[in-house]
Image (cartoon, rainbow, N blue to C red):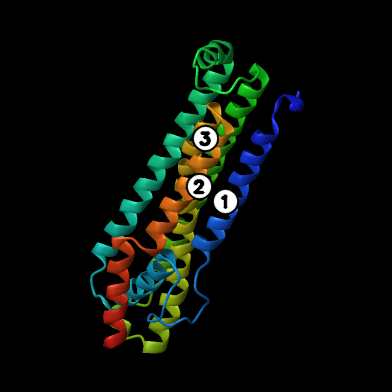
Amino acid sequence: MLADFQIADWVALGFLIVAWHAYGYFADTLPSAGTPLSGSPRNLNMAMHRVRKQWMKQMVRREERVIDVILTGHTVNSLAFFASTSMIVIAGLVGTLGGSGSAFRVLESLSFAQVTTEFVFQMKIIGLIGMFVIAFYKFTWALRQYNFLCALIGAAPGHESHPTEAEVDRFAEHASRMLSLALTSFNGGIRAFYFAVAWLAWFVHPYAFIGTTALMVAVLFKRQTQSRSQAAVMTYLDMLEKK
């Protein structure tokens, strides 16, 4: 049955796997412990880790921490939404797999779609289900890590105890790293959604799959290194460096 796949299909699938892992390695690598707030982070995620470290420092110094609770709760709600959405998409795709015969005939009627077999069509749907399963596990792991972060925030030194600068730095390092790890998992789930869109192009043609995957990587890379968001964060870090 695997012989039904063409060489172009295997090349396209291999390209997706390599692109996904290569970009993930680039985007998810965090600065090492003790890295100063200032510097030249290679991407937006590394820059945001420095911003989160500054956030945790300010939280310890604040007498009232209501804003920190609100910000944390907002992201937890977003994570729960995406985890639920992943399950809904998985259920929908399983239903599509059950009626794959009708869906396959619709695809066959498209003049621009690659001629293939129903087995290949079903395997593509199973692969798409697998991508959303990955997204679901990324989101739920991020939720767990946010629970760990909440415990760290609850154990933060109190403002009235007048923590030393060394104590503030030490707490901020650990808390910001936990926060960044949670958001790295969150980003991984979002990334699975992006590449799932590229996967849809495989139903049309493997070359369309390769092109869409390359486009997704280019868009994500540009956002990490040359977007207005990245420039705004870097401007803030430059301001910190000048203090």
Front residue (pair 194, 79): 194
Going by the image, does 163 lie left or right of 195?
left
- Badge 3 amino acid: Ala
Q: For the residue carrying disc 1, how many other residues have a C-alpha within 10 Å: few (<14), some (14-19), or many (20+)?
A: some
Disc 1 on helix, strand or loop? helix
For the residues labelled 1 and 3, the Cα–Cα distance comes to 15 Å
Q: Work out whether mark 2 precedes mark 3 in sequence or the reverse, and give the earlier one.
A: 3
Closer to viewer: mark 1 or mark 3 = 3
> Cα distance, mark 2 to mark 3?
10 Å
Residue 214 disc label: 2
Q: CA distance from mark 1 to mark 2?
A: 8 Å
Q: Amino acid at mark 2?
A: Ala
Badge 2 marks a residue whose secondary structure is helix
Q: Which of the numbered marks, if any, corresponds to residue 208?
A: 3
Could you tell me which residue is drawn at 70 percent across and 28 percent down? 5
Q: Nearer the viewer, residue 166 or 199?
A: 199
Secondary structure beneath dot 3 equals helix
Mark earlier in primary sequence (1, 3): 1
Q: Can you tell which quarter of the image residue 176 is in?
A: bottom left
For the residues labelled 1 and 2, say whether their Cβ atoms are less than 8 Å apart.
Answer: yes
Q: Tell me the tag on residue 82.
A: none
Amino acid, disc 1: Ala
- Residue behind mark 1: 19
- Position of 195 relative to 89 (above/below): below
Quadrant occupied by the C terminus: bottom left
* In this rendering, the label closer to the viewer, 1 or 2: 2
